[in-house]
Image (tube, helix red, strand yellow):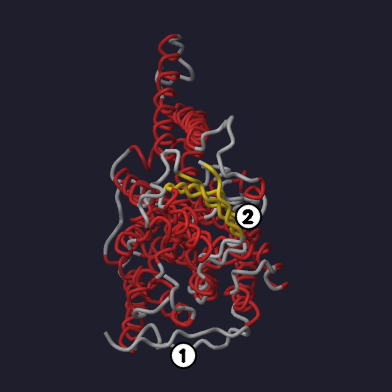
Amino acid sequence: MSAKPEAVRINAEGIAAPAAAPVAGAAFKGLLGVLVLVGIAGFAAGISSGNADRVWQAYLVNFLVWIGIAQGGVVLSAAYYLTQGRWAGATQYRLAEAFAGFIPLGFVLFWGLYFGRTMIFPWVLHPIPQKAAWLNTPFLFARDGIGLLVMTVLSLALVRASRRPEATAWQRNSADIEMPPPTLRKIAPALGIAFTVVYSLIAFDLVMSLAPVWRSTLFGWYFFGGAFWSAIVAIALTAVILRARLGEHNVLRDPTVLHDIGKMVFAFSIFWIYLVFAQYIVIWYGDIPTETFFIVQRVYYMPWKAISYAVVFLMWVIPFVGLIGVRPKKTPAILGAISLGGIIGVWLERYLLVVPSLSLHTIPFGWVEVLITLGFFGAFMLCSLPGLDLVAAAATSEWQEGHE
Amino acid sequence: MNESVEIVGSFADEQACAHCIEKLRELRALAVRVFSPIPSHHIEHAIGKPKSTVRAFVLSGGILGILTALALTIGTSWEWNLVVGGKPIVSWPPFIIIMFELMILFGGISAVLSFLFNARVPAFEIEKGYSSRFSEDRFGIVVRCAEGESARVESILKDAGAEEVVREAA
């Protein structure tokens, strides 16, 4: 074994973080750039080959998935502040905020939906008179645009304040009982509340309105609960990958850190199935056709039945059974595999919420969907790289002798 | 064994107490009893107790709760064959809620009962060597050993940082 590097001690200002090597090399960045171009090419080819409806559906699905991960992560950081969680020092905050770079781009991408509105929202071409006051193009884009703008500003403010020296010093100092810095004490609860309001609105407007006669009051909650969980599994997967990449001395090597992240994956997976069941039972009891059709289409008839079962397995059955014990939570391969499955599950779940409303009898999945998803993934990762570099710096600098 | 004695050492420091327990445990023949004013992971670890059986009771209580709920819901539905809202007599979605609730209830009750059982509560006799300080701010180690070994045990306790070492007849 090579010589052990000296464990770095952090001074009170928390500035001692050594410059860690960037997480991604030039080749990987180039690959991500190519993915973005592939996505744009797929978008253009889809539009010009007469698949515009599928292009816009895939665009909406990917918008919901990736902004959900980015936003859910920042909300998780706010939740850490509210609960004063410091089980992995600054590393847990950098991990939660790693994807925040995508939020401004997501805000821009939201406006893209305006150009595809006729192919996404059935009520644009066939308005429902009773609901026209709420479901009309100017009002929808105004209210959701303002909501997302508020979320973007709040999120960037939180991330900015959270990376300041006084905040990182607080994050590392888990032994004292000081409150977090005052700015964060204000932003964190505001962000949490705004998230529930804005993302309920997003769920009602961008998902529920695709089946404009259907309604479920709990749907907003269910939607942002899923987004929050998607951020947690993305963080778990990132932790597992960085743990292996950052060499022998980093905070993520501490099995208790993976254990804690694993607990969150486990807990919020149960929360998600709870919200699924809470909606299902009410609709089942009421048995009103305008409510039941949404579930019947997805759960009782092929081809969507298969996707529904896959989603429940990936988002609840596998995480629940797989992570119920301590050892699986601490085993990187198991936690990583379940988290990867979770992200795929969330993507399928958003797909399942959006697409059957517009294409009931066939699953439109082909090169259009694949290319657009790759493009979104590339853009998401490119925006997240600076945040991931900060995770790497925090995880390696905070490592201390005897931490394990 | 009329020649055995009990030696009580009191500690102000949790870590010192835990280290002392570890040292005493190396001499396998000794019976060691520990009093702690707080639940302490260090001491728990030092004692080397196997994992508590409470978890097994909770699991079986939970499973029993689910089975009870199944019996209750399906049994009463069959007992009174009333079709409600055109749904089957035994319609499982609402039963899940009862199953969940009774799982929690039975699991919780068995947790409390098995905790009391494990903690030997209620105890009508105060254990030997106990002093009220061990419920306030001191940790106590009581070692039962043969008269001839007492000097060695006392020195271990003192070396480990015991504030006070007292000998009592066993």
Circle count: 2
Residue drawn at point x = 59 percent, y = 53 percent: A135
> What amino acid does circle 1 point to?
Ala
Q: Read off the residue under disc 2.
A: B138
Decide which of A101, B132 is in the foreground and name it: B132
Callout 1 and callout 2 share a chain: no
Residue B159 numbered tag: none
Point out residue A220 in the picture as x, y percentages from the top left corner.
Answer: 56, 50
Decide which of B136, A37 is in the foreground and name it: B136
Q: Quadrant of residue B162?
A: bottom right
What chain does mark 1 sit on? Answer: A
Tag 1's secondary structure?
loop
Seen in the picture, residue A307 relative to A386 is either above or below; the reply is: above
Residue A19 numbered tag: 1
Q: Quadrant of residue A259?
A: bottom left
Tag 2's secondary structure?
loop
Number of the front mark, 1 or 2: 2
Locate the N terminus of chain A and report the quarter of the image it occupies.
Answer: bottom left
What chain does mark 2 sit on? Answer: B
> What amino acid does circle 2 point to?
Arg
